[in-house]
Image (spheres, rainbow, N blue to C red):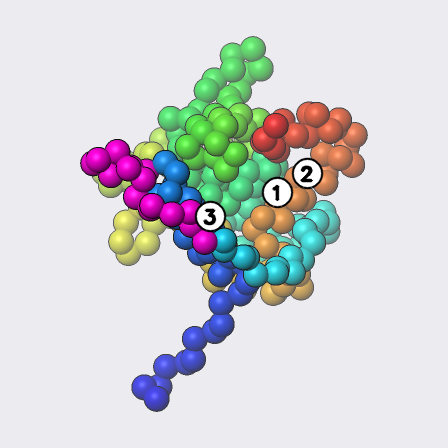
Amino acid sequence: VDGREPLKPATPTTVNRSLEVVRTILNRSARAWRNEAGRPLLDMAPPLITMLPESRRPPYTMSWDEQDIFFPELATHLQVMALFGVNTGLRDENICGLRWKWEVPIPEVGRSVFIVPPEDYKTGVAHVAILNDAAWSIIEGQRKKLATDDRKDKNTEYVFTYRDHKGDHRIDTINNGGWQRARAAAGIPMMRVHDLRHTFSSRLRLAGVPQEDRNALMGHGG
């Protein structure tokens, strides 16, 4: 009526994420959280919440030819981050939130690793991000970029930043309009940011890296 486009219906995945939050709050209110008298916030067992069925599409593995077409379509800062992702297997939030203070030099090999703390990693366990030659080259490039930036308001906390009219800030997600336009232009509209991680894992397997080592490099729990 007011000229705005109608809202799109929420997907089952989106609904289930919200239901999971509600379920967690209810369960903790009944079993863990207490009031001032020491009693649970809920005096009864929470109701059973049934999740909606989801149809998850299988992960997509990007070929080397597709990478050669796709990455040049990305803006420079996204291209660097995507290349870092496909060479480390880190999730979108860990690439965007990568901090310089997490870097730990390893003198014996002449480079560093990044240790993502438990509170910032999905499994709740600290993850050591190993840098191959391509990932290390990106880190060195970002370090040089930071060192040669003489602006007073430069962002020195995060490895990957972007400057716009509001200043130099952390990037919230790689999956923005630029990413979506680039994947459409490259002819792989199904390519998600998380598929960079799947591609990393697939290339490790094809290179003959043992399962145990792949699990460690991927940061799988257990």
Q: Position of residue 144 (x, y in %)?
A: 42, 32
- Asked if disc 2 and disc 1 are in contact, CB closer than 8 Å, the reply is yes
Q: Residue at x 59, y 35 (%)?
A: 88
Q: Which stretch did the figure color magenta? A: 33-47
Q: Residue at x 39, y 38 (%)?
A: 31
Residue type indicated by callout 3:
His
Q: Considering depth in this image, is 202 or 34 the residue closer to the camera?
A: 34
Residue type indicated by callout 2:
Ser
Q: Which mark is residue 197?
A: 1
10 Å neighbourhood of mark 2: few (<14), some, or many (≥20)?
many
Q: Main secondary structure of the magenta part?
A: loop
126 vs 154: above or below: above
Q: Does dot 1 land on a helix, a strand or a loop?
A: helix
Q: Is residue 34 magenta?
A: yes
Q: Considering depth in this image, is 186 or 44 the residue closer to the camera?
A: 44
Marks 3/2: CA distance?
A: 23 Å
- Find disc 3 in the rendering and name its residue: 77
Q: Is residue 106 magenta?
A: no
Q: Residue at x 61, y 59 (%)?
A: 54
